Amino acid sequence: MKLGLFNGRHELPVENYIFFEAVDPTDLKGMRKQIAKAVKLDENLDLYVTGLTVATAEVISFCFENLIPLTLWHYDRVENIYFPQVILSEQRVQYLKFDCGVDA
């Protein structure tokens, strides 16, 4: 699954977003509800980030809690490309689910 963090902040190579409008950065519960609506629990997430660290951190937390493999994609202005940052790999998720007996 490929999602942008925010719609309208930057042109991103995705069609769907987690947040379609501005959020209150102190409303973690509200952000979490929106993340839960947008992210499928059974798919890897490629997230194109566009600022607002607190929203990015909340997505990372959600993915860790739900064992969703997560890669953040950041824009490189010099090269004019996006580059990946693996946060939670598929291999790590499999290890946590099966080798450590974590319920998924």
Image (cartoon, rainbow, N blue to C red):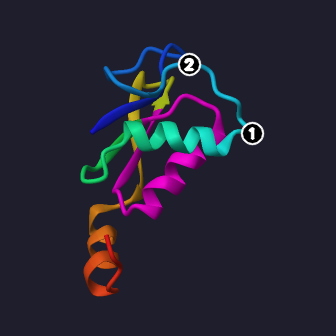
Q: Residue at x 59, y 48 (%)?
A: 57
Question: Does 84 appear above or below 67?
Answer: above
Start and end of the magenta stretch? 48-74
Q: Secondary structure at mark 2?
A: loop
Q: Secondary structure at mark 1?
A: loop
Question: Sequence order check: which comes first, mark 1 or mark 2?
Answer: 2
- Residue 52: % across, % down: 64, 33
Q: Nearer the viewer, residue 65 or 29?
A: 29
Based on the displayed image, in which of its 4 quarters is residue 80 positioned? top left
Q: In the image, 63: left or right of 97?
A: right
Q: Residue at x 71, y 35 (%)?
A: 25
Residue at which label 1 appears? 26
Q: Residue at x 63, y 45 (%)?
A: 29
Q: How many marks?
A: 2
Q: Residue at x 49, y 24 (%)?
A: 78
Give the label on residue 21, or none. 2
Q: Nearer the viewer, residue 40 or 73?
A: 40
- Amino acid type indicated by mark 1: Thr
Q: Nearer the viewer, residue 4 or 41?
A: 41
- Residue 1: % across, % down: 27, 39
Question: Does 60 appear above or below 10?
Answer: below
